[in-house]
Amino acid sequence: MPAQKKRVFNSMREQIIAALDIGSSKICCFIARVSESDDGLSYRPRVIGIGHQVSKGLKSGTVIDMEETETSIRAAVDAAERMAGGSPIHDVYVNVSAGQPKSSFFSVEVDVAGHEISQLDIDHVLSAGQKNLQNEDRFIIHSRAISYSIDGVAGAKKPLGMFGDTLGVKIHASSVALSPLKNIQTCLNHCHLNLKAAVLTPYASALAVLVPDEREIGAICVDIGGGLTSISAFRDNEFIFGEVLAVGGHHVTRDIAQGLSVSEVRAERLKTLFGSCLTDRVPARDQIDIVQTSEVGQEQAITIPRSMLTAIVAPRVEEILELVRDRIIETGLADLAGRRIIFTGGASQISGLEELARKIFSADWSPELRGDFHIRLGRPINVDGLADATAGPMFSACAGLLNYGAESPDDVHSISADKVKIGIFSRFGLWMKQNF
Ligand SMILES: Nc1ncnc2c1ncn2[C@@H]1O[C@H](COP(=O)(O)OP(=O)(O)OP(=O)(O)O)[C@@H](O)[C@H]1O
Ligand SMILES: [Mg+2]
């Protein structure tokens, strides 16, 4: 666990926090107790309440029917509250996938006149960076100082106490379109919930599934959900990239429904029970029973070779993985974030995905990658108290929201960072007084 800033605990040295994952397939609420570790440096959430509900009123993470979304949110939150002992929650950490999340980077420099770099200098350079964050249509959801430079030499991790003439900072800003975020906030308010912080879905998933070494050395996390696939990257313990692609497990289900003329409910079942993305691994003699629905609504039970199902599933999963690979190449993440990918999210459970990903992310299949990637599947590992049924990869984003709430990282400017912002500006005022 990285070094943490001190947080305020009640007399029992613990806090209750709540997370709400608004996904395209399910809405999930986790309530957790966060206790300070003995050394006072880490805060590991222990889940005490869980509620999840099929999500209604959303399409690919975007609210399309507020009433339906609110009903699903209320049901998930009610169940979690009851399991946690009945006290109502108010503040929630919520994930955001809508509004075409985008990562951008910029650097700013300030003059520190050769003296020892103080916290006020660091605040000054971060405040200077804030000016670059203003954007009328897009909301900056996270803005993290990902590295510092002194006199143009990059790589300073902790510039505090060092000497130099100029102090620079590289900032990673994640932005989303404002309207979808406002719609989520309005739904929450109608449910008497307060948006404590909005967290980008890929960021939350990575917090849940990456081990500390992966966060430090560099790793990419890919959450394949129902309607969306999100990509995030960490390096030097910092969130350095987050993006969402509009493809996921639902597309596989829809392909099966269309290709085999079955209902979506039946297609979903066929996918999870018999689907595979390895065409050469399904024995030719394997047969499955399906119930087809004709155009006039008549149902007919037939038996088909299982390879027919695989021939539908495999190309779609391959397409999703290739889209992810292309983004990793286009954005330079292959060089920036190391050569390790952790797949999570409900649809990462499609049989054979890990092996197919290993093929696609190899230099043989994709020479542009210039080397093989290490691939593993991930599930939430950084929270305690999850039962087997809720410890699977589909709960990574929700668990990661708890990790975010427990760590409460300092954003240079964010929806959650009003206090931090005030902190920076008040210290900035002092810096002005001391230096001019
Ligand atoms: N055992 C399984 N095998 C294959 N696919 C599965 C399995 N379990 C769940 N899925 C698929 O996972 C998808 C849902 O994943 P998840 O719960 O992570 O999505 P979500 O968070 O609700 O949606 P999103 O992240 O896209 O907004 C569905 O398409 C579902 O069919
Ligand atoms: Mg999800």
Image: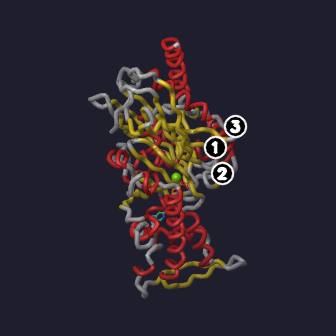
The residue carrying mark 3 is 136
Which amino acid is tagged 3? Answer: Glu
- Mark 3 vs 2, N-terminal side: 2
Determine the residue positioned at 36% across, 34% down: 43
- Mark 2 vs 1, N-terminal side: 2
Judged from the image, the secondary structure of the residue bearing numbered disc 2 is: loop
Q: Are marks 3 and 2 in contact (CB under 8 Å)?
A: no
Type of colouring: secondary structure
Q: Residues within 10 Å of mark 1 (few under 14, many from 20)?
A: many
Residue farthest toward the bottom in the current orientation of the protein: 285
Relative placement, left or right, of 420 versus 134 is left
Q: Nearer the viewer, residue 85 or 32?
A: 32
Tell me the CA gap for discs 3 and 1: 28 Å
Residue 431 place in picture, x, y as percent: 49, 16
Q: Are marks 2 and 1 in contact (CB under 8 Å)?
A: yes
Tell me the CA gap for discs 2 and 1: 8 Å
Question: Depth-wise, is mark 3 or mark 2 nearer the camera?
Answer: 3
Which amino acid is tagged 2? Answer: Gly
Q: Which mark is residue 70?
A: 1
Q: Which mark is residue 386?
A: none
Q: Is residue 351 visible?
A: no
